Image (tube, helix red, strand yellow):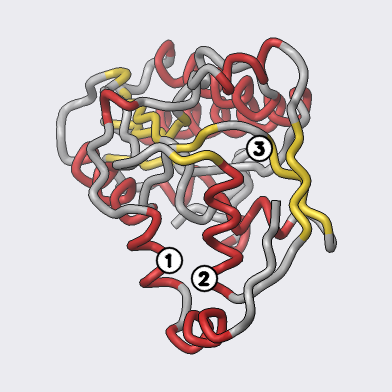
Amino acid sequence: MLARSTGVDLTTGRELDGRLAGASVVIDVSNLQTTSTKKSIAFFGKATSSLLAAEERAGIAHHVALSVVGCDRVGFGYYLGKRRQEELVLSGRVPATVLRATQFHEFAAQLLARGGPIALVPQMLSQPIAAREVADMLAGISREKPAGLVPDLAGPRVYSVPELLRGYLRATGKRRLMVPVRLPGQAARAVRAGANLAPERAVGRRTWEDFLAERVPQTARSSAAARPRRSVR
């Protein structure tokens, strides 16, 4: 595994040559949590460039990259970084495949973890998919011939983000004041129009409800069910 915890730095190329020796396929799921266009483009640009250069030296036969659905249509900072990553991968000398996926089921908890007692909730839709299904698809792709940009991978249902967060709070018995936020700008309008969705590629099987039932302890769900409800809007 190539990770900072093992001494590898994708942005500088540190330790890449030694770690890629003898490998034939690389699956790139590197990521950065940011809303900054500058930071996103800088990270994905540097990390992807150094990784591809090291792969070329090592004779890697197949580079598989995980991207995000809508990065070609949404102008948010993170999405623009992923767009840059795709451009480098698809125009590079290492034969490659790029898979775009929708947000993971963990997306709702990540949004709640970013704030304090008040959660700012973007008014947008999401089509969450199980991370394990994305991992299985990437593994399958890695065993095939490089195919460029392949069809999107999306979850089985579309939800509003407030709906996801309310469901998570109910299931965990937690309380949080949620304040809906209507994001401004062209990128936000694109997301509200569903540019981050792929309803025609709703091939994932595990639903959001399946995720909650599996990941939230039964004791938490029982406690939440017994606790008096208070409307959260």
Q: Give the quadrant of residue 81.
A: top right
Residue at the location (45% across, 31% down)?
Answer: 67
> Which one is nearer the viewer's eye here, 15 or 2?
2
Residue at the location (48% across, 33% down)?
Answer: 54
Q: In which quadrant will I find the N terminus? A: bottom left
Residue at the location (52% across, 59% down)?
Answer: 167
- Contact flag, marks 1 and 2 (Cβ < 8 Å): yes
Ranked by sequence position, the earlier of labels 1 and 2 is 2
Alpha carbon distance from label 1 to label 3:
35 Å
Q: Amino acid at mark 3?
A: Thr
Q: Position of residue 127 (x, y in %)?
A: 42, 38
Q: Amino acid at mark 2?
A: Ala
Residue 11, labelled with which disc? 3
Q: Is residue 73 left or right of residue 211?
A: right
Q: Position of residue 233 (x, y in %)?
A: 70, 51
Q: Give the quadrant of residue 37.
A: top right
